[in-house]
Image: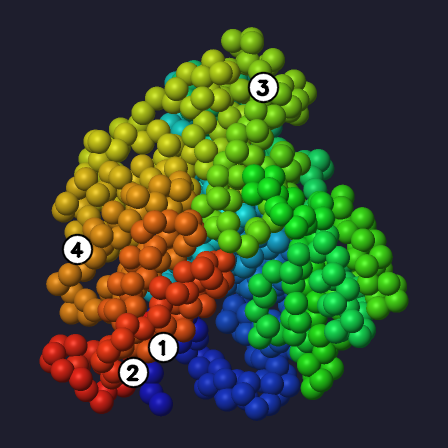
Amino acid sequence: MAHDPYSPCVCGSGKKMKFCCQDILPEMVRVEKLIENQPEAAEKLLKTLLQQHKDKEVLVTQLASLMTSRGGHAEARQQLVDFLREHPDEPRALLALADLCIGTDGFPASRRIVHRAFQLGVRQFPGGVAMLASAIAGQMARMGCAMAVREHLALAVRLAPQERRNSLLMQLANFESQRTIPYPFRGRFSLLDVELQDETLAKEEMRARKVSQIGCWEPAAILYTRLVEKVPQDGALWHNLGLFHAWDGRLKEAAAALHKAAELIEDYDTAVETEALAQLLDLEVSEESYGVVQQAVPVHSMSALLTALDNDPRFARVLSNDREEQEDGSRIAAEFELLTAPLADKLDPNNLPDVVADVTVLDNDGERGGKPRVLIVALDSEIDAATATFREVAGELAQEPEESDRSQLSRMPQPCRLFDWKIHHADKLGSSHFRQLDKARLTDALQQWLETPLESLAAKTPVDFAKDANNLVKVGGSVIVLDVICNRMGYDPDLSDIRSRLGIPAPSPIKAEAGQSITSLPLLQFGRLATDGLSDDQVIEFANRITLVRHLRLLETAIETLVQRPEALKKFSPMRGHLLRATVAREKNDLKLASKCFDDAREAAENEPDAFRTRLELDIRELSCRLDDPHDPELPQLLSEIRERYFIKIPEIEEVIREELVNSGCDHLLSQLEKTPGAAAGLWTPESEKAGSESSGKLWVPGQD
């Protein structure tokens, strides 16, 4: 096959073929054919070619790739190192060596070669840099460096070719939606503006910004370290240095620089947010933490074991998915909660016991050889006692667990422990009641936080530390950290009363500039965003961003602003907007507002092509919401409407509704589903609804297209 000598070279260097690989093109075509079926022969040919053409980086990178694929990492590395000694600035060889080093030594040991590869390869091979950045993000996730994960993924998205960009965008969106990660770490941070009078220093600062834009955060930090030595009182320099360290995975260095920045930055709110970020990073590296542990206990005689657990009032059986299968083929036979106190015959609904441990009983399915065992999940401080209690009840039905049967599932910063509880959900009380219990428990926990000595406040309580006006930046930062901790544990309280009691100024509002992207703001600043000055597009962007982040209080702000903007709501999707508003109302136990939101959603969907199906979805959503209060006076009427509207047309819906009532502890409402005498029979299809007559079309049920 003929090749135009002035077309781009097939090796991907970007050079014309005439000035690149034309002299070895036949051999390279032969190599490509040999790789598929005779990789050893391809490797041998590449070695021969490399001896003849020692300056061809395509030969050494291809050879290193073949060696790596057969496990010859050391040999591949040596080939690349030898080549780079003679040709130190060849970008593809640098990228190949960086990729190899990351895979074998890890990123921390490979920083220098990686950042050199970034600098020399970003223009000619942006896709290669994107691939490395994505790999580094994976390693940073395992190291617990969330800010570094986010920035490396964002870098990969910016540089990746179009065919790979969508996949990386999905990875980034998935990362940003992880509630187990402190929400400020899931967004971007902006470098502060720096004003330097010295022209030489200003050029160095600009140079650091440029290398930071291509992910070279260690070189940027080195340049900034020199700058802060010469201008030590510039808070913006210290702030940016802290970000470079955090993006590079150096959390301790990042926290130290940000603490220093918070002391020097004059603007109170910026200083507080900087201090909050420093305290959050301190928590990530602190040894003061607690864990969630899983203990496996081998068992036998499954029916006898289940009987023993059912008969002990300390164990409460909960609904389980019997079809769920484990990796070894065993299946869930039952699930229990081990409680802090035995269940009484008559429970006090306002004084329910807490859950000490979750207990899952796994049975052998008889086919794949799964081992019968019990999995006990509890806090590390309680796992031994929980295991002992289970073995006491199980007796000879439980065997002695081995050391390998225990594993750690996760670790959390110690301050989270104050907000870490699980109340036993007794039947027939409804989710609304448990939200009230959680709210009361949260109020007590917030009071306890005010009276708890914190490491971030020199081992003093927030109340005592705030008495000195010089400490208000640190105290303000600790309140932001409190908000982040609560969000991480599933709560988003209004902390304005906490701020008032500590004498902290209310956060100053931020006015977005016309045309400014809301995602350009750090998530720490979203609580200060002045929504009344936002354009419709900015309101939509704000709502979308907070929906992904899942911060209930901020979502309420965004959605309440959105529903007041008809044009913005239309662009956003009225149905989606009203349902999000219903979600917020439900979480706040405002079922009256939630019901109004469902009515608004029905009105918005009235003229949609599939209005009947949409109405069914909304009715079932509202039913699920109202079942949070089993004694909601509107429930009988809603059930009656559902029965009359859907049961004849879609018979399967009746079973769905019955199951929902039973699972929600609302058996007393089953009588509302009794069919009315003389009701017409028949099946409903979408076509029959449009035609106004019955049809023999396919039966439709929710969730089926």
Residue visible at 25% across and 47% down? 596
Q: Nearer the viewer, mark 3 or mark 1?
A: 1
Tell me the distance, in whole angstroms, between the alpha carbons under discs 2 and 1: 9 Å
Q: Nearer the viewer, mark 2 or mark 1?
A: 1
Q: Nearer the viewer, mark 3 or mark 4?
A: 4
Q: Quadrant of the C terminus?
A: bottom left
Q: Which residue is mark 1?
A: 652
Of 627 and 487, the residue lying toward us:
627
Tell me the distance, in whole angstroms, between the alpha carbons under discs 3 and 1: 57 Å
Report whether residue 655 is seen.
Answer: yes
Q: Which residue is mark 2?
A: 699
Q: Quadrant of the N terminus?
A: bottom left
Badge 3 crowding class, 10 Å Cα cut-off, few under 14, some 14 to 19, many 20 or more, is many
Q: Quadrant of residue 640?
A: bottom left
Give, as a three-letter code, the residue at label 2.
Leu
Residue 140 position within the rendered picture, expressed as x and y whole percent measured from the top left = 58, 51
Tell me the distance, in whole angstroms, between the alpha carbons under discs 4 and 2: 26 Å
Give, as a three-letter code, the residue at label 4.
Glu
Badge 4 crowding class, 10 Å Cα cut-off, few under 14, some 14 to 19, many 20 or more, is few
Earlier residue among tags 4 and 2: 4
Q: Which residue is mark 3?
A: 462
Earlier residue among tags 3 and 1: 3
**Tag 2 and tag 1, C-beta contact below 8 Å:** yes
Residue 352 position within the rendered picture, expressed as x and y whole percent measured from the top left = 61, 43
Report whether residue 375 is seen.
Answer: no
Earlier residue among tags 3 and 4: 3
Residue visible at 83% across and 53% down? 388
Q: Which residue is mark 4?
A: 603
